[in-house]
Image (tube, grey):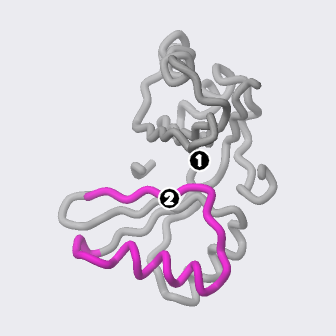
Amino acid sequence: MAETVQLVEYFYVQVPDKPGEGARLLAQLKEAGVNLLAFSGFPAGRKGQLDFVPEDAKAFKATARKAKWQLSSAKKVFLITGDDRVGVGAELLGKLAEAKLNIIASHAVAAGAGRFGMLLWVKPGDVRRAAKALGVAASAKPAAAAATPQG
């Protein structure tokens, strides 16, 4: 089976870099019944940045608004899933290298049962070219319709 490449929306929040901040925000989403397709957190200067790829962007934004999060505007990220095999990451990143595109960041994980998932960020001005290189439409869909690093 080939990989599924989707250009989806993500949002980020900057939080104090202290224990429990990610758990606190994730608990608020859990309580609201908001499902995530992906989540990433990392230090950003003296703060932490939490990136969320929601299944339903509208429900996610409503929850963030109610919780008074300082939410970014919608950004774009490639969400890639497929059968895990040796070299799949090299193949995907190779397509962008051939197109002479730089990658801002990527996260990949073996998901078990022979599957993998990857998030891949490029500069906003490179999204259209990256989408073409990866063989996907260049307009980002809200994650619900389609089934980081700060951009």
Q: Where is residue 13, by image quadrant?
A: bottom left
- Tell me where the magenta segment starts and ends, as one range: 16-43
**Disc 2 element:** strand
Q: Residue at x 57, y 43 (%)?
A: 112
- Which residue is tagged 1? 76
Among the two numbered marks 1 and 2 on one chain, the one whose residue lies closer to the N terminus? 2
Q: As displayed, is residue 74 above or below residue 134? A: below
26 and 143: which is toward the camera: 26
Query: Which numbered marker is on residue 39?
Result: 2
Q: Amino acid at mark 2?
A: Phe
Q: Is residue 105 left or right of residue 29?
A: left
Q: As displayed, is residue 78 above or below residue 26? A: above
Q: CA distance from mark 1 to mark 2?
A: 14 Å
Indicate the quadrant containing the N terminus: top left, top right, bottom left or bottom right.
top right
Q: Is residue 78 magenta?
A: no
Q: Where is residue 17, by image quadrant?
A: bottom left
Residue 63: % across, % down: 61, 82
30 and 62: which is toward the camera: 30
Residue 144: % across, % down: 77, 59
Residue 149: % across, % down: 40, 49
Q: Is residue 141 left or right of residue 87?
A: right
Within 10 Å of disc 2 (Cα), the crowding (few <14, some 14-19, many 20+) is some
Q: Amino acid at mark 1?
A: Lys
Q: Is residue 146 left or right of residue 133?
A: right
Q: Is residue 38 magenta?
A: yes
41 and 61: which is toward the camera: 41
